[in-house]
Image (cartoon, grey):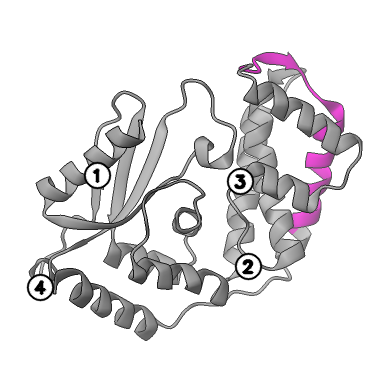
Amino acid sequence: MKAKIIAEIKAIEKQENVRILYACESGSRAWGFPSQDSDYDVRFIYIHQPEWYLSIFDKRDVIERPIHDLLDINGWDLQKALRLFQKSNPSLLEWLQSPIQYVTPVPIIQELQAYVERYFSPKPLMHHYLNMAKGNYRKDLQGEKVKSKKYFYILRPILAAMWIERFKSMPPMEFERLLTAVIPQGKLMNEIDSLLARKKAGDELDVESRIPFIDDFIVVQLDHLEEKSRTLKEQRVEKNTLDQLFFKALKITWE
């Protein structure tokens, strides 16, 4: 599948007349708990030739392809990515540290990756993960029986928010890294480990009775993290810094 992904990336470069600077996995495969039929959620950052940006009209700054044969691939223009970086866009920040890379980041992207920690802004990231956890909880964990695999889509953002509280840095994408960093050994860890082992073994974790110990943990942490989020600060990288990075990218890429 990796060869197919790389071939599609090269085809996009040719069809769109762009250079792809970085490509990675962004979904459950990067998180470490894919299903057998999970899509490959490939995301990339690309740059047009300089003349493309010299226009008085707005242009489309995303490239998308229809999902086909488990391949879900799309990307953002570098200019769009830098604007979103300035706002601490959570999706972009996760892409930049994905453990699965299909196009190794060029030096410009490596600079941007270094900025993640330097300009880390805890408040918007904490709100993002909290809203994700709360939304999934309301949607997927109601009633006496639930789809057990849905626990992961609530636990992961909660663990990420806990990482932010504890380490004041960008949380990693991998579920197990988050888990071992913020949850001590004990009954909760054992319950989550058991669920994770079943998921990795290919058990689709269909409708089952709820897991009270994990349920209680979720409720307590949602309340605690909501309160904690009110004390966090927000910071933004200066626009001039990102402008200079963009100009450098244009020059280096197309010289």
Residue assigned mark 3:
174
Q: Are marks 2 and 4 in contact (CB under 8 Å)?
A: no
Please report whichever mark, 4 or 1, sits nearer to the chain's N-terminal start. 1
Crowding around mark 4 (Cα neighbors within 10 Å: few <14, some 14 to 19, many 20+) is: few
Q: CA distance from mark 2 to mark 3?
A: 19 Å
Is 97 placed left or right of 137 in the picture? left
Q: What is the three-letter code of the residue carrying label 1?
A: Ile
Q: Report the Cα–Cα distance between label 1 and label 2.
A: 33 Å
Magenta stretch encompasses residue 222 = yes
Q: CA distance from mark 3 to mark 1?
A: 24 Å
- Residue 219: give x, y in percent of width and height: 80, 41
Residue 19 vertical position relative to residue 72 in the rendered view, above or below: below
Q: Residue at x 78, y 33 (%)?
A: 192
Residue at image x 35%, y 85%?
240
Q: Which residues are magenta?
A: 204-226
Quote the CA–CA distance across marks 3 and 4. 40 Å
Residue 11 in the image: state x and y as whole percent.
Answer: 16, 42
In this view, which residue lies farthest toward the right?
186
The residue that label 1 is drawn on is 9
Q: Position of residue 205 (x, y in %)?
A: 66, 18
Answer left or right for 146 relative to 125: right
The residue that mark 2 highlights is: 122
Q: Is residue 188 magenta?
A: no
Q: Are marks 1 and 2 in contact (CB under 8 Å)?
A: no
Q: Quadrant of the C terminus?
A: bottom left
